Amino acid sequence: MKQPAIFNWSGGKDSALALYKVLQSGQYDVQTLLTTVSEPYQRISMHGVRTALLDQQAASLGLPCRKLFLPEMPSMEAYEQLMASTMRELKSAGATASIFGDIFLADLRQYRENKLAELELQAVFPLWGVPTATLIREFIGLGFKTITTCVNEKYLDRSFVGRVVDEEFLHDLPATVDPCGENGEFHTFVFDGPLFSQPIPFEKGEIVYRKYTAPAPKSDDSGYECGDQTDPSPFDTGFWYCDLV
């Protein structure tokens, strides 16, 4: 019997590969995607992708998507209250597990496990511990297609945003940048692949720069970028975003 589960979906490559592995395993019944969305901007948190494109992803995947709307720069307390309330509601609908695309950020995994344990939910990590160079090439080899929507200027310059992640992209990455962007170097939007009934149509819009000063979130590609703000250092970096329309 399959275990009813929530899938934490960011719209990016790690989410897509993790969902692929989960569905291939046959162990889980994914009841819904769960995505954190900036309420003021109506875009996926950190990724900057419009909710209209998120809706098209969910429709092509054949799965419902629950949006968790967050205020701009929410406090940790506000975030945790909103998340706990949402998870309790999804648990009452039958979910017993929550699935993430995390790969190696141990402190973030511990945070998730601790918070879910309080709600008596299991945390599942299908990609955990696999070398990121292996994962990104598996992702490409399976036929997934993804484009960078956000890059952190501390690691990458403007030229890397709005690019399709392929072998050329990987070749151009500096040696200090994780090929899956697991340290928050870049975020992506998946627009085609073996899970999708049809590609997601879009056009590249303008490229914009935004700088943030706030408590630094731990960043990954699972849609829970606000999930662990234990680092008190200032989040004083800028990001390049490519708008997809």
Image (spheres, grey):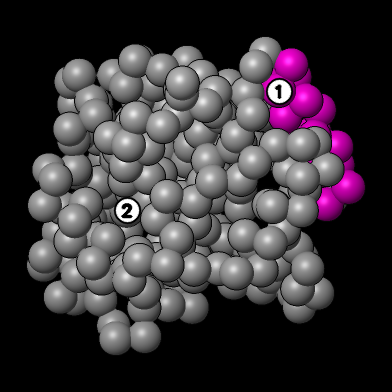
Q: Residue at x 19, y 70 (%)?
A: 170
Q: Is residue 100 magenta?
A: no
Residue at the farthest right position: 77
| N-terminal-most mark, 2 or 1 | 1
Q: Is residue 72 left or right of residue 94?
A: right
Residue at the farthest front position: 1
Residue at the farthest bottom position: 175
Position of 32 relative to 131 (above/below): above
Say which of marks 2 and 1 sits in front: 1
Position of 43 relative to 230 (above/below): above
Q: Is residue 79 magenta?
A: yes
Residue placed under numbered mark 2 in the picture: 148
Q: Amino acid at mark 2?
A: Thr
The label shown at residue 91 is 1
Q: Would you call the spot at circle 2 few (<14 residues within 10 Å), some (14-19), or many (20 or more)?
A: many
Q: In the rendered view of the protein, which quadrant contains the C terminus?
A: top left
Position of 73 relative to 213 (above/below): above
Closer-to-camera residue (186/60): 60
| Residue 84 in view in this figure | yes
Question: Residue 162, image x and y in percent?
Answer: 28, 53
Q: Amino acid at mark 1?
A: Lys
Find numbered disc 1 in the image and state the secondary structure of the residue it sits on: helix
Question: Residue 106, image x and y in percent?
Answer: 60, 69
Query: What segment carries the magenta color?
Result: 76-92
Question: Residue 15, image x and y in percent?
Answer: 40, 44
